[in-house]
Image (cartoon, rainbow, N blue to C red):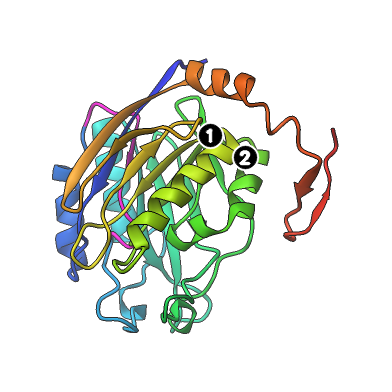
Amino acid sequence: MIPELNVALVQTASGLDPAENRDRLAALVPDDTDLVVLPEAYARDFGPTGSDVSAFAEPVDGPFVHAVDEVARTRGTTVVAGMFETAPDPARPYNTLVVRGASEATYRKIHLYDSFGYRESDRLTGGDPTPVVVDVNGFSVGLMTCYDLRFPELARLLVEAGAEVLVVPAAWLAGPHKVDHWQTLARARAIENTAYVLAVGQPAPRYSGHSLVVGPMGEVLAEAGAGEEVLRASLRRADLEEARRTNPSLENRRLTTGADGGARPAAN
């Protein structure tokens, strides 16, 4: 098995011009990593609160995904990036993560941000509540988006599906307690699942920044500040295996979470 996964988290601000965001990909994606993660809504930012983003939705074979795939293949890596995807309701697109390059997957955000005074569900459609796990260079990577981080059931379902790394692109809005919540929740998802967490956000001032790489024992391996920054880290399989030997909480479970969110006795 591959002993390490070299990752880069690109904490960058998305603009309101989709063409400019596409053009920046070549400068943002490095060529010496296995996995590059960009924030939620990188293809085009949300704009003013409550904005209609449907005009900027694209299919997953549209220009943004084509550009992501092209730069990923040119760099010999896998790229995760957020976009608005056309949905059956044309007025309410999906908030989607695309994985392109050496590996491919698509994940539509399940938990829409109807919290802290916001109503994401007024403008977007939630995805099917099915966990998405993709192989990236021998590591199983589970996909989550922003507000999903507040729901431990999804992280556990991803780990039950084999995830060893949880990737969380976000546009985590700034505000009281928000950085503390972001850091605490990322570490909690890592500790309770003995998994790596890669949480990458957009920078201040609108968003919270503080992208971070968390190890499977909850240790922060790398953390950004508030501004634009690229974090790099190597995820070691030996450390993952050691964490799961030391803290075999996944094996010791008495309850398991079903796809319907209900708890039931674990098979073991």
Graded by Cα atoms within 10 Å as few (under 14), some (14 to 19) or many (20 or more), the crowding at tag 2 reads many
Q: Residue at x 76, y 53 (%)?
A: 258
Q: Are marks 2 and 1 in contact (CB under 8 Å)?
A: yes
- Amino acid type at circle 2 is Val
Nearer to the camera, 22 or 170: 170
Q: Is residue 211 left or right of residue 187?
A: left
Nearer to the camera, 157 or 53: 157
- Amino acid type at circle 1 is Ala
Splitting the image into 4 quarters, where does residue 130 fall? bottom right
Choose the circle earlier in sequence order: 2 or 1: 2
> What are the residue bounds of the magenta stretch?
31-42
As helix, strand or loop, the secondary structure at mark 2 comes to helix
Assess whether residue 163 is covered by the magenta stretch. Answer: no
- Residue 117, placed above or below residue 240: below
Q: Which residue is mark 2?
A: 159
Query: Main SS of the magenta segment?
Result: loop
Q: Residue at x 61, y 44 (%)?
A: 158
Splitting the image into 4 quarters, where does residue 52 fall? bottom left
Q: Measure the alpha-carbon separation of dots 2 and 1.
A: 8 Å
**Could you tell me residue 100's position as x and y percent?**
39, 44
Q: Which residue is mark 1?
A: 195
Q: Quadrant of the C terminus?
A: top right
